[in-house]
Amino acid sequence: MEPHVLSVSLDKSTTPWSVLVDPHGHANHVYRHRKRQTLTWKLTGNAAGGALLPLQWIRQPPKGIFGEPKLDSNGKRMTMTDFNHHAESRGSWTYLLCLMLDGKRYSTAKSCPAKSPSTSRARPTAPRRTGVTGP
C-alpha cells in the first residue's frame, strides 16, 4: 500500500510560529484495511532545513493500533505503522509534533517540551487539531 504522506512545514501566520501538518487530501484519515499501512511525516518548504523530534501522544491510542514512530537518522522524515484492521482500532488520536530549526523548537501546540521524552508517551498539552483517525 502507498504510505499516507503528511507534509510538515511552519505556519508563520501564528505567533509564535507553529508546526503545520498538511494531510494531502486526508492522509491522516486511515481507512480500515487488513494490511498494515504507513503514515509518513516529511519536512517540506520552510521547515525542510529542520529536524523532527519524536512524536508524542496527547490522546494515547490503545496498544496494538500503531507501531512505534521511527525517525530517519537526519530527522527529515518519520514513519509509523498503522494497524487499523478491526472495529476495535476505530477512533481519533491526537499527537504533539515538534521540530527544531535554527536552534528553535516549534510545535503543533502552543509550546514544545524543552527536552524530548525518551519514549513517544506525552503529558497532555493544548493541541492544535492534529491527529490520526480511522473509521
Image (tube, helix red, strand yellow):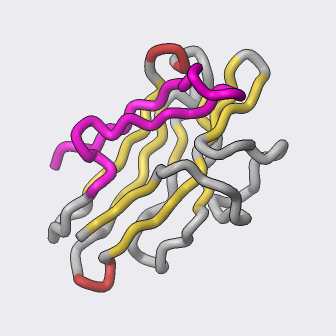
- Residue situated in front as seen by the camera: 53 or 7: 7
Q: In x, y percent, where is residue 57?
A: 58, 61
Q: In x, y percent, where is residue 112?
A: 73, 43
Q: Residue at x 34, y 62 (%)?
A: 133
Q: Does 54 sit left or right of 25 as displayed? A: right
Q: Quadrant of residue 106?
A: top right
Q: Residue at x 32, y 77 (%)?
A: 89
Q: In x, y percent, where is residue 7?
A: 39, 31
Above or below — where is 67 with respect to 72? below
Above or below — where is 84 with respect to 101? below
Q: In x, y percent, where is residue 109?
A: 64, 46
Above or below — where is 65 with respect to 55? below
Stretch of the chain drawn in magenta: 1-29
Q: Report the label total.
A: 0
- Residue situated in front as seen by the camera: 83 or 45: 45
Q: Does 95 sit left or right of 34 as displayed? A: right
Above or below — where is 40 with respect to 51? below
- Residue situated in front as seen by the camera: 103 or 76: 103
Q: Residue at x 60, y 51 (%)?
A: 96
Q: Which image quarter is the C terminus in?
A: bottom left
Q: Does 132 sit left or right of 116 as displayed? A: left
Q: Residue at x 44, y 21 (%)?
A: 44
- Which residue sits furthest right? 114
Q: Quadrant of residue 4?
A: top left
Residue 99 is a magenta residue: no
